[in-house]
Amino acid sequence: MTEEPYRWLEAISNRREDIRDQLKGGTPVFALSRPEGLLLVGVGQGQSKVFEIYDRHAFAALGHPVDIEKVRQAAIEAAHLEGFNRSSRDVTLRRLISFSLSSNLKNAFEQVFSPPFILEAIFAELGQAPAQDILVRLHYDGDHHYETSGVLVAHHDAQSEAEAAAWVLKNLEPKDSLNRAANLCLAAWKALTEKRTFEGLAAPSEKPEAISGRVVEIALLDRQLTGPVHYRKLDYP
Amino acid sequence: MTGDFLALLPKDPPLPPVSAANGLPAPLHATTVFAFHSADGVIIAGDHRATAGNIVFSDRTEKILELDSHSLMAIAGVPATAFEMARMLQTAFEFYRRSQLQGMSLPAKLRALSKMLRDNLPAMLQGVGVVAPIFAGVETGEPGAKPGIWFYDPLGAQFEAASFAGSGSGSGAIKSVLHYLETWGQPRPAEMPLPQAVTLANRLLMTAAEFDTATGGVHPKEREFATIRFLSSQGIRNISSKEQEKFWNEPSSK
């Protein structure tokens, strides 16, 4: 099959379609750069979607749980080896994503005889100030981009993902509490999963969004913590 | 996935083993460290001196190392080996916690240090890597768990201390005083509140320094105090020099 280039292209195209189909079962995850730190929000059904990677690094993803786990473990291994051999300051998302994770994802995606990774992910790196925070959106095929607006959403549909991010950004004030920021994410989560439009969607108050039958996961890469570890889980509501 | 960070590291050391008989300079030694139970938790303390033979190499050495939020290692012996061991354990504990989504148990942490000492046997036999650490830790996720103190021989045998432990060349004097106080003291160290226990720790190091040239760097009159950490079920608290000075000057802690 692969001896004919157009067949390979067709196989890749089919593969992309198949992955997108499988990702439709996943629900979105969010990351926001706030004065207090980097806030990550996910909603699951028992399995975690938000994880600590290293001292100043976290990860949130939707997709196949096994693939999320593989990428998580790979990121943790690479980060800890780098941190041990050099220092924790040398563990950066730019190197982790560009030189390790994205190339492996791209290879897996293009090897048409082996299974690809089925996931859409966000990586977050805490800076000393919000302007130095780094958010990276990583796709199943290794493609990735750095988000500078301070709001990042990962969802299976690119258009609704962009609409959700724009809506959160529009409704988020610099002085908003972490609770309100999390509520905005959860309101956007509800709208995305119920396939509602963001046009005219009212921003929620401080009151927690009710999400029944699911586990809300909220974590903060806390800028105020003085030790090496900055990741901590927050209770919700 | 085992959560074993050490399995990711290369097996062969980057340099071939050497012998002290090959004309190497005297290896550095870090002394003196000790730990004891106080009323609210464990005090673990050390002086600041590192020596090479009869040379004072440094009077600013940090010998109490935090391995994670609930465990500490006090090092006595060859700093190069001890610092590397501490760094490996720090990374291994955090790696396990992050990769396995649960903290390593206290017995597993104790075993990890024991195994690392055992693996250091060739360097120890060559006389260039002897380390005799003290470990203080408390189980995480167990409300009301009490912190414990363990000490090791350089081969990796592990012993739990009922009241106190000491290591390094100045530890003999310190252990003698602690034994006396635990037996006949009023109050005993195990009954002392934090300010009094911190002042005792500084006095113990000053006592050791009177008899051991390898112990030093604690001079309250010059506002130079010991390295002291306090471990309780809440985790680790660093007792800063400023706080130690305050306790030192408090009449109640004398």
Image: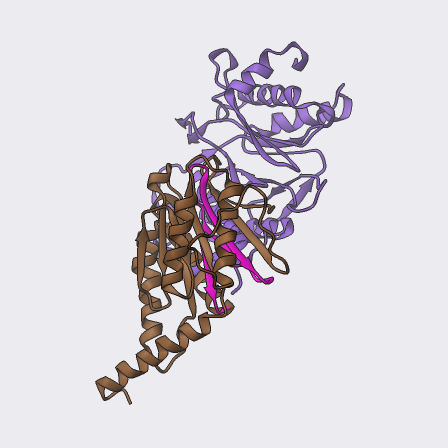
Chain colours: A brown, B purple
| Nearest to the observer: residue B53 or residue B106 | B106
Task: Point out residue B71 in the picture as x, y percentages from the top left corner.
Answer: 58, 41
Q: Could you tell whether A38 is left or right of B154 in the image?
A: left
Answer whether residue A193 is magenta in the image: no
From what the image shows, is residue A112 above or below residue B33?
below
Instruction: Give the magenta-colored segment's residue range.
Output: A35-64
Front-most of residues B203 and B154 = B203
Which residue corresponds to the image point at 44% horizontal and 52% vertical from the top-left?
A200
Q: Which residue is drawn at 52% across and 39% down?
A: B66
Magenta segment, principal secondary structure?
A: strand
Q: For residue B196, which quarter of the picture?
A: top right
Q: Position of residue B132 (x, y in %)?
A: 55, 41
Measured from the top left, where is residue B185 in percent x and y? 75, 20
> Farthest left residue?
A5
Q: Relative to A8, is B16 above or below?
A: above
Position of residue A42 in the picture relative to residue B198 (left or right) = left
| Quadrant placement of the N terminus of chain A | bottom left
Taking the magenta stretch, the answer to whether it contains residue A42 is yes
Residue in the picture at 31% in, 75% down: A110
Q: Nearer the viewer, residue B94 or B107?
A: B94
Query: As drawn, which residue projects farthest toward the front?
Result: A200
Residue B210 appears in the figure: no
